[in-house]
Amino acid sequence: MTDKQENIAPTKMPKLRRRGWTIARRMAQIFFLVLFPLPILVAGAGWNLFGLSVGGDVRIFTPAELPFYGSLSSSYLSVDAFRLELLDPFAVLQVTLASKSFSLDWLIFALPIFAFYLIIRGRVFCGWICPANLILEITDFLRRVFKIKIKERTIPRKAKIIVAGVVLVVSAILSIPLFEIFSPISAGNKLVLYGSTAGVVTLLAIIITELFWSHRVWCRALCPLGGFYQLIGRLGLFNVRISQKECIHCDKCKDKCLADPMILDPALEDKAKAVLAGDCMLCGACVDVCPTKALKIRPGLDHFKPVK
Ligand code: SF4
Ligand code: SF4
């Protein structure tokens, strides 16, 4: 134990407060996991479920009659005269390239989502909203419970930016929005509504990879949507900030990092005031586990100034 580790006592806090970010994030993940399938479960019986038409005389709600409907790629909220349509910007890019056409509406509907992640931090989507991430966190937990041993593979985290580029190029060449078809995100919705199994197959392949091959390889290195948000992640206003006075260099934060432990190094080595990497998903796991509360999630831009 270093002198600093002996001198700074771990911060005593009630357990719930110590796990505050993790609890808030779980609630958000569960909310978004339920939000999109809910209209299908509540009002959707009788639609083209599993690709089969039910038909008959029974009164069937249509999506247009629901106040909220959609998926993480495309959704709307409609109450009386108010109507808000939202599109995933990466899906809009794929569809634009695949269809070789441009619609101003697509741009307008994608802009609020793009602006939100640009201002907050790109990969907040991965940490707080994406259901695939939640499923992979559960898979990781089960792997630990059942003591399934795997090697850590070090696929560079920037690989997912290249994957995002390849997806866009292939979408343009084949005239299909490639990731929208094979995406594990909203795979359940697509299976129930259209009988499409492509997303479920991708999700199963990712879960098997997570269980038996490598830890978090999909989210860390391969997901093109994660790569797209990584590109704008550095510009976000919210960051994990470090107080060097309180850090005892125990590395517990690195052990818990969902993105890539290496992204904490510049802050821990006093080369940066905050975790700057676009890969950080503001999951707060490092903040919760830090025994001295040296890490905090805070807004601001001063962290871009060099450390004196
Ligand atoms: S910031 Fe990381 S290395 Fe420093 S005390 Fe907290 S958990 Fe340990
Ligand atoms: S640096 Fe902290 S907040 Fe960012 S992804 Fe890693 S554990 Fe989560």
Image (cartoon, grey):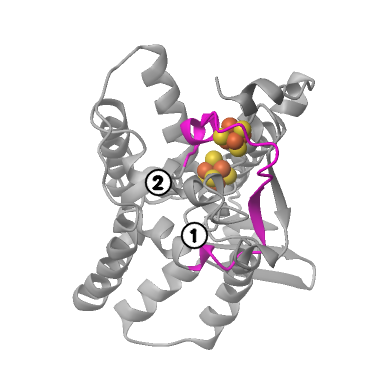
Depth check: 118 or 43 in front? Answer: 118
> Which of the marked residues, 2 or 1, is nearer the chain's N terminus?
2
* Mark 1: amino acid: Gly
Residue that badge 1 annotates: 278
Residue 40 to residue 14: above or below: below
Measured as percent of width and height from the top left, residue 184 is found at 37, 47
**Which residues lie in the magenta part?**
232-258
Measured as percent of width and height from the top left, residue 28 is found at 65, 41
In the image, what residue occupies the spot 63% across and 62% down? 308
Identify the disc placed on residue 187.
Answer: 2
**Cβ–Cβ below 8 Å for labels 2 and 1?**
no
Residue 93 to residue 206: above or below: below
Give yes or no for residue 14 being in the magenta stretch.
no
Measured as percent of width and height from the top left, residue 306 is found at 60, 66
* Mark 2: amino acid: Ala
Identify the disc placed on residue 155.
Answer: none
In the image, what residue occupies the spot 49% across and 42% down? 131
